[in-house]
Amino acid sequence: MIKAEAVNLYYNNFHALKDISADIPRHAITAIIGPSGCGKSSFLRIFNRMNDLIPGARVEGNVFLDREPIYGGTMDAVLLRKKVGMVFQKPNPFPMSIYDNITMGPKRGGVKNKRALAEIVEKSLTRVALWDEVKDSLRRSGHDLPPGDQQRLCIARALAMEPDVLLMDESCSALDPVSTMKIEELMLDLAEAYTIVIVTHNMEQARRVADMAAFMMIDQNKAGILVEYASTEQIFSSPKDRRTEDYITGRFG
């Protein structure tokens, strides 16, 4: 689904990511793990060119989405972000109604028919198991929802754009255990239809939900590197690199 080949990321003169290669499988959950500051979120943002928004950022190497180059080709960044949705660490509903949170993207994409928009709202909220809770209060502000429901609203907002890939950057870190469990169950359900890549510090979460795991750390020059990438089962039961084993067993990080 997504292929990274010898990717390097620079912020001006700072070498943030060094020679990272990985194949992200379709309709699976891939977890990016590693200590703070190793470039996990920077690597995630490579896949929808969010780093383009940071002054001085530049990417070298190749990244493909369904064999189409994300960088250096004809890929439009706006179209890419429609195909590759993103959910951030803290729930960030727009300061508007639940209905408007969901329909803003489709409206900007040219959907004007009220019935079509209503169907998008119901479908998106149903996918995140939020429809029954809010169907009678769609004009309520998204900020009035509890944090866990706000995060599900943000996921629904991303799904309304009908992406192929969903990126989730520490999307449970600000949530309580019950809300975290709901989001994890949602991830497992969504993986049947979407390719999902998550960044998480929660090792147990990675073990519970991920099919593949990528362990990152920093090298002696403070650049983020990919140490090991394999099935989650292998990473957690029989890692090939001692540094991976040291991290997942808590000896460092």
Image: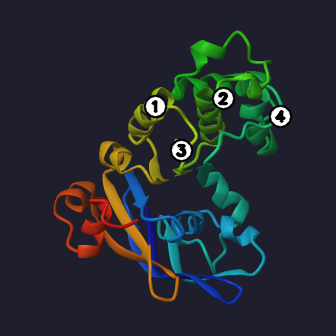
Mark 2 lies on a secondary structure that is: helix
Amino acid beneath label 3: Ser
Q: Earlier in the sequence, mark 2 or mark 3?
A: 2
Residue depicted at 60% across the width and 25% down the height:
125
Q: Which residue is mark 3?
A: 173
Quick check: 97 left or right of 57? right
> Which quarter of the picture shows residue 251?
bottom left
Q: Which residue is mark 1?
A: 177
Q: Is residue 101 above or below residue 191?
A: above
Q: Which residue is mark 2?
A: 120
Mark 4 lies on a secondary structure that is: loop
Please state the horizontal and vertical placement of residue 4, each as a whole percent of the image: 46, 74
Q: Is residue 114 above or below residue 17?
A: above
Residue depicted at 60% across the width and 64% down the height:
45
Q: Which mark is nearer the camera, 1 or 2?
A: 1
> Which quarter of the picture shows residue 154?
top right
Q: Earlier in the sequence, mark 4 or mark 3?
A: 4
Mark 1 lies on a secondary structure that is: helix
Which corner quadrant holds the N terminus? bottom left
Quick check: 13 left or right of 29? right
Cα distance in 3D space between marks 3 and 1:
10 Å
